[in-house]
Image (cartoon, helix red, strand yellow):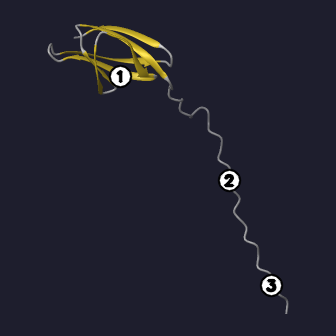
Amino acid sequence: RPTRTPAKATRPARAEAPAPDPTTTAPKAATGSGKLTLQTKPWGRIILDGVDTGKFTPVVEMPVTAGTRRVEVVNDRLGKRVELVVRVGAGETVKESRALE
């Protein structure tokens, strides 16, 4: 009688992940930090990306994470506010001046 040798188990070949398509790859988010100098008339409380900073205008070189930031300045006593969007690059200082309406 011939003896049977069990067949060796083979692993399925690994498929390599395709290279990302450069036309559909999302851009990288900005990294690092920058600064924001903000002046308003009248003064107001600064809300950055929906979070109250505890700071009031005028503010000089307030550290912020680099990227697109949503800034609100609110004066509750006068019922006035202004909203703006600023783009802060790493190592950059952005200066803005606004009137509260």
Q: Nearer the viewer, mark 1 or mark 2?
A: 1
Residue farthest to the left, as pictured: 77
Residue receiving disc 2:
15
Question: Hey, what amino acid is under mark 3?
Answer: Arg
The numbered mark, 1 or 2, whose residue comes first in the sequence reads: 2
What residue is drawn where x is 17% and y is 18%?
76
Residue 56 on image: x %, y %:
27, 15
State the quadrant of the C terminus.
top left
* Residue depicted at 50% across the width and 24% down the height: 32
The part of the image, by quadrant, that contains residue 77 is top left
Check disc 1 and report the residue beneath it.
70
Tell me the SS state at disc 3: loop
- Locate residue 55: give its quadrant: top left
Q: Amino acid at mark 1?
A: Arg
Sequence-first disc among 2 and 3: 3
Q: Secondary structure at mark 2?
A: loop
Question: Relative to residue 93, is residue 14 depicted above or below?
Answer: below
The residue to which callout 3 is attached is 4
Q: Is residue 82 left or right of residue 18?
A: left
